[in-house]
Image (tube, grey):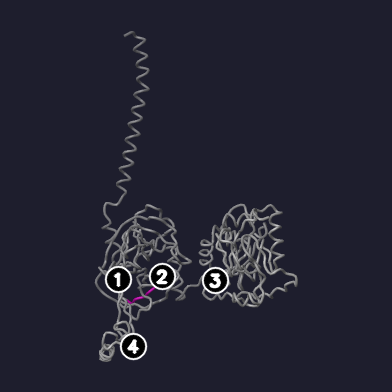
Amino acid sequence: MKPDSIARTRNLATPLRLFWITTLSMVLIMSQSLMANAQARPQSFADLAERVSPAVVNITTSTMVAGRSGPQGIVPEGSPFEDFFREFQDRGGPDRPRRSSALGSGFVISEDGYIVTNNHVIEGADEILIEFFEDFELPAEVVGTDPNTDIALLKVEADRPLVYVPFGDSDTMRVGDWVVAMGNPLGQGFSVSAGIVSARNRALSGTYDDYIQTDAAINRGNSGGPLFNLDGQVIGVNTAILSPNGGSIGIGFSMASNVVTRVVEQLKEFGETRRGWLGVRIQDVTDELAEALGLEEARGALVSDVPEGPAMEAGMQAGDVILSFDGVEVEDTRQLVRVVGNTAVGKEVRVVVNRDGKTETLRITLGRREEAQAVPVAQPGPDLPEDEPSSLEALGMTLSPLYDEIRLELGLSEDQDGLAVVAVDETSEAFEKGLQVGDVITEAGQTSVETLAGFEEQVEAAREAGRKSILLLVRRGGDPRFVALSVDDEE
């Protein structure tokens, strides 16, 4: 090989050698990183379980159940055996009052004996007995309960400081994080199960729901027990399972600790919850409602009614869209309810609303939700013109003024105004959106309507303004909601 050829080969070999060295280095680094991640996974939960177990308790409740007064359900009425069973009961048979027991779980949150569990675990109980991991028992008294979040706070008197566990920040938990559930499943005593966070911010049926979903095994008897992170902090209270057969199928729900801690603080201080109350009825803003309201995006909470209360005193109106509450941007109704409920009673807050395409800021002093009594303001009934037609077909509905016979038929008060829906075309958009015979339309295009002519004017005004739909305020059984109906196909 010629010298210049050798030189060129060496020149080519140097970059190639550097490439392979770099590639191998990267592979080695990635391999080490994967090994480090694998080592970060817990090899065992034993140390965690040993550390927190003394703070987890079994709860046994007992309730006196009244017996039945006769043999109903045992023998048919009039049966020749009826007298025999009645005599048996009179002698102290199975229908005399008896004591019923139930099992659940809980955990100690302070050395002086405060214990958290589910409300449904102790609801209606005459006696509550706490069994500790260290094999001793103490009777407990109820400090306070909150059925809305299914949380109860108990208190025991011990002759020494109790081992307790702290709450963690549930908002820092991510889907995929390890969690450990502890409790008394199926009455089997102290038990540990492990899994991951499957989902967050789940809602089941309550107004203040904020559940962590987990695949850690949760069964009956786990109710009220803690859900731990790997630092031994309680990030949830095990409350419910989703199951076709009553057993764990890997879909369990724990009330998030950031909800529980606020409830516990109030129960400890007041013996009850004291949630903020704005005093409005609200619904989510859909894309169609946003278009009808002239909003750029479907965000916020649409006010459908303003009964007597803090919001009415501050000047809020039906049709306002709440965009911001006390500096927090409002995404939907569920978020607003939670934010308001977590705000102190009596606090003055700034509420930003969109009204007729413009933003306004209202100052509202919150009331207390538990004491709130929504009383709608009575409005005078409409004076219908003599030449008012008896009905109008529009937007897939047949509407009628509120004549006396219609009020009587629908059970409406004399102060109720608006137009009655007396028929709905089952092929129409109105039918698809749930409008029914008996509904009362009180507003169209955010303007009160008391006559058929007034309704037609608002529909025509929506068309002339180039809107695709018109916003209707509909009341059913006194409950209001907004519905957007298309006006494009109306001639």
From this view, report whether residue 79 is shown above or below residue 397. below
| Marks 4 and 3, the one that precedes in the sequence | 4
User: Can you give x and y, in whole percent of width and height, for residue 311 in the image?
Assistant: 61, 69
Bin the neighbour count of mark 2 within 10 Å (Cα to Cα): few under 14, some 14-19, many 20 and up: many
User: Can you give x and y, in whole percent of width and height, for residue 425 in the image?
Assistant: 58, 61
Please state the extent of the stretch shown in magenta in the rendering.
Answer: 150-157
The residue type indicated by label 1 comes to Asn
The residue type indicated by label 2 comes to Ile
For residue 69, the mark is: 4
Of badges 3 and 2, the one in the foreground is 2
Chief secondary structure of the magenta portion: strand
For residue 58, the mark is: 1
The residue type indicated by label 3 comes to Val
Residue beneath disc 3: 345
Q: Residue furthest top?
A: 2
Residue beneath disc 2: 151
Instruction: Identify the secondary structure beneath mark 1.
Output: strand
Quarter of the picture containing the C terminus is bottom right
